[in-house]
Image (tube, rainbow, N blue to C red):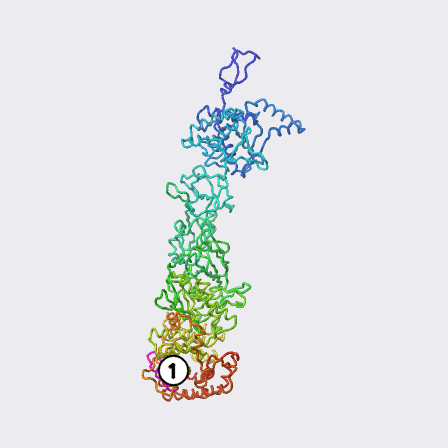
Amino acid sequence: MAHVFRLYTAGGNDNIEGWNDSNGYGTKAISSINDPEGGSCKREITSIPSPFARIDLMKNAFRQVVESKDLDNKETIYHKLVSDCLDVAEIFFNIEKLRDKFDIITWNKESSLKQLLEGGNPAHKQLGETLVMYLNQDAKAYNFDLLKNIYLLNYKGPDAPSQLNIVGATSPVTLFFTSANNLNYVSDHVRFGNDKPFDSDFQPLYKRDPNFILYWFGLKNYWNQLQKSTERSFSDLFKEVDEYLDLTYRHLPQELKDRVNVMTEAQMVKYKSIPIVNRDDLVEVLGCELKCLDVDSPFCSDFVIDSDFSVDGKKPLVLPVDIFRKPLIYTQDPWDDKIVVPVHDKNKDLSKRKLPVDGRTYPYLTMGDFLEDVIICNTYPLNETCFYNGGDKLCSQSDGYSYLLPIKKEYFKYFTIDDLKKHFRIERRDVSNDKTVKVTLEIPIKEQNGQVNYVTYERFYYETNSGVSDEKNGRVIVKDFGLYLFPFLKVKNNVKADYRVNVMDFAGDDNYDLHFGDGKDVFEKKCCLGRNRTEDGEMIKPTGGGVFDPQTFVFDKAFSYIVFDVEGVENIIIPEFHGKTGAQSFEFAVDFGTSNTHIECRKDGGKIEPFTISEDERMIQPMSLNYGKDSDNPVQADFLPNVIGKSFKFPTRTVLSEKIGIDWLVDTVTPMAETNLPFVFETFPLPPYNKSSVDLKWANEQESRNRICSYFENLIILMRNKVLMNGGDLSATKLAWFYPASMSSKRVKEIEDIWIELYALYFGGDPETQIVTMSESIVPYYYYKKNNKATTNVVSVDIGGGTSDILLVKDGIPLYLSSCRFAANSIFDCQPSRSNPFISKYIDTFRKILDAQTNGEVMSLVDSWMEEDRPASDIVMLLFSLVRNKDIVERGIISKVNYSSMLFSDSKLKILFLLFYTALIYHIAKIMKGKLLDCPRHLAFSGTGSKILQILVSVREKGVLEEYTKLIFEKVYGEKYDENGLDILINTSNPKEVTCKGGLLEMKTMSVAKMDEMKVCLLGTKDILVPSSFKYADVDSNVINGVVNEINAFTDLFYELNKEFSFNKRFGVTKDWESLRPYFSRDIAKSVKDGISRKDGKDEVEETLFFYPIREILCAIGGSEKMLEPEDE
């Protein structure tokens, strides 16, 4: 019998001879055909290169896998085909997050066939006819009769080999099918959890994304519901797939089975239809819409950021950039180390970012969102007590440099500063001069079983470029700058913030900028002021060359951190704010004097003390220690000292330091930025970009009034911050200020209005009740009344630099007051500075001592003031202040530069002090006699000018002064002094304190009208008082002659006093001082006329004319050669 050759092995007729008929291949026969490759997955089945053959292969593959009952086989081509088919299905399912990699192309059966058949091209027509034949022939077997469209997936992502790269399509019999091409180029760029499509690691359905599994079973139910009317169920149309789903179900875990069991067609609404881009139709198979995952639908990831802050939109994921081995769920599967997360995502909008590998649009954060690419290294050690060091354990041991924090401000959208301190650290190499550092930041993510997990970012920063080739590494840039923060406290939410941050750069070659953050909010500065810049922005260089570029940033909101920007590189600075909480009440008293200003304060009604800023209250804190060669000087010159109460303290000179070029009539001037209180005024020269303004108290021009406002604003900022640093209640703060009796009512009102406006701005209380306006003529009495029991007949004399105020008290009741422009400066300004004996006589002595034993700054300050032709009183005050100069104190040479001691021993110049004192007491005695008052039991002195009394006599010899004073009263009164005698009261340590202390003891507003009623003024002729409404224009020759006669009478008395009370023996005045008598009678009438000419004739006479010639006599004597003669042998 002949052998019958056939492919299949299952039965068959062996009796066929020749060309006899035989049956066609059935299913049984086909399934018994031996595959020469053994069904190996190593080679695709490609013998018939047509879509129809591919559709049939996919159908057969599902059948083969089901029949094997082995879903996990990794060897057969059928398992590969099914896995690839599921990959195509999963691409459609995830198409919304893969739109950048795939296009969907529609092939419409009707229109496409019509185009082929009727297009006029014979070849196309033949193809069309062939397709029609196949579609009709297999209409029932492959559901072609129900087919409307086939949707093809075109890959267009990275490594796409051509413009058209069809990787798969929809199928009318298995829902999906694949191309037979090598699709490895897709595998490298698309991921489903840990699975790569079209690779050699075949994935059965039950091992895929649970959402995808549920979708398949939901699609089956959805189909059955839609096709009820046709009675063509899912299993009828997709038999092989349906059987595969049944087999899959048996492999599912019970939890997923339970979810499948309740997966009805109604639940398909959570999935989205798949639209075709630029077309109106939706992807469907046999009229049933396919669905895709809604990328906006929630998914359960373990990488969700663990933040208590609310965020706009979805909470982002935090993804690791380094190896991460914890088995946490990414989007659907555990995290795979092979997932590459970029250090930076180019899309700054988190909501538009695509998750790495997963591909869906969903917000996520990476290392570049938290850590800057550059860390700033400052060349000075960090002030760790006041600024956070980033956990740098070697910071305090460093050899002079520190790091800012390379934290992006966006970090604080999710976390607090306390969070940062727990999860951030800087680690430097313990190697000299190596500025490489490692920064570690832990970002908390979703809790598991009550335990927080973290994504840890580690970044190395290198000073050289050699270590920066890896994007994960950063650079170190080294900068030389100083930063100072004022005030160093965190204000409460209901308190108006007012900060200054001073950035100083001795290199001057960098541009700095600051922003201020509090939580997720980052604010712009109010302004930035370059004090050493001209209007054109040109830098004013320091004297002696070099570069110095200070900038002051002004900010008016509470903040927790500073965003420090240098040339576009941003790092964070975190102050460790100090401060106390509480509700203490504070009272301040401000004595705004011509030469000096003093402040006293009291807390909760306790002890009255001079205003200080202790070490514990430091309002200004440097970020860097030991910045620059003279780190403190620029800050003290442009800002204020760290501590007030030691080297620098109140009282301080009444002077305003201001930026050169301010237009006081136009510009809005910022205190503690463009102006400040230069406590260093008498210590070293101010920088050349500053100008100092003195004589603030009495200047009447509008410019000067605006300067007063700025001066007060600087004072009130200090007082405000003193309250805040000590946990005080701003609105409960009281403020007393003082005016001299000689000040006009109009001028008092102008100054009072300034205090009221500033108090309301900075303290927020009711200025009507909290501002206390008092007369500086009266308040010293209250101090002596309390401390010295001076309650009987008392004369209180407050000697300032420009005015002396006199209060007459009888039986403890203030009755009269008087004021005159006759004070300490009347002595010291007796001649211009260049020819002034108080300077020229001692300048060489000071120069010799200071040049030899100090750094020369003080002497250079004296010389510069001489060059500027400043008032002699300024330079004299500077010489007096040397005993408090920090450099001099530390060198132990106070005794060598004690100016008071020098003048005490100067028998020539001493006559000027004695003449001043005698004229003042003579005038007081005349007033008291005119008002029929008894001689005083107590004579109390206050004010800075009263220090001249210590030049006349030593503290131990106060009795000499008391005897002399009684003698003057006896001469004026023409009778012996009361047997109770006279006590002179002097606050020798700081007479300027008396006014402020007395004010705080009384703390009652004294109206100007009431003070006007108490005012008395001697005309200057005997003991005649100025008549009511007597004006300067009313001063005639009779009055002037009367003043001349009064001066002559005083001169006679002065010389008579010397005969009874030897000036030489009792005060150490030169023996031949009597030769100066001609100066007492020279041009007396002229000096009166000159003084009147400087007044407005319409103004009432408010001070005696007696001191006009006395001042000229002092000037004449001060200019005589006698003052420059050497001391008597």
Residue 1106, compared with residue 572, is above or below; it is: below
Magenta segment includes 953: yes
The percent position of residue 485, horizontal first and vertical second, equals 43, 60
Asked whether the viewer can see residue 909, the reply is no
Q: Which residue lies at the image location 55% right of the left edge and 14% below the top edge?
A: 22
The percent position of residue 184, horizontal first and vertical second, equals 51, 34
Q: What stretch is highlighted in magenta?
A: 947-971
The answer to which of 694 and 355 lies nearer the viewer is: 694
Residue 232, compared with residue 620, is above or below; it is: above
Q: In which quarter of the image is residue 107?
A: top right
The answer to which of 659 and 1049 lies nearer the viewer is: 1049
Asked whether the viewer can see residue 496, the reply is yes
Q: In which quarter of the image is residue 20?
A: top right
Q: In the current view of this chain or complex, which residue is farthest to the right?
A: 120
The percent position of residue 843, horizontal first and vertical second, equals 43, 77
Quarter containing the C terminus: bottom left
Q: In which quarter of the image is residue 261?
A: top left
User: Element at badge 1?
Assistant: loop
Residue placed under numbered mark 1 in the picture = 933
The percent position of residue 544, horizontal first and vertical second, equals 48, 68
**Kind of residue sitting beneath label 1:** Leu
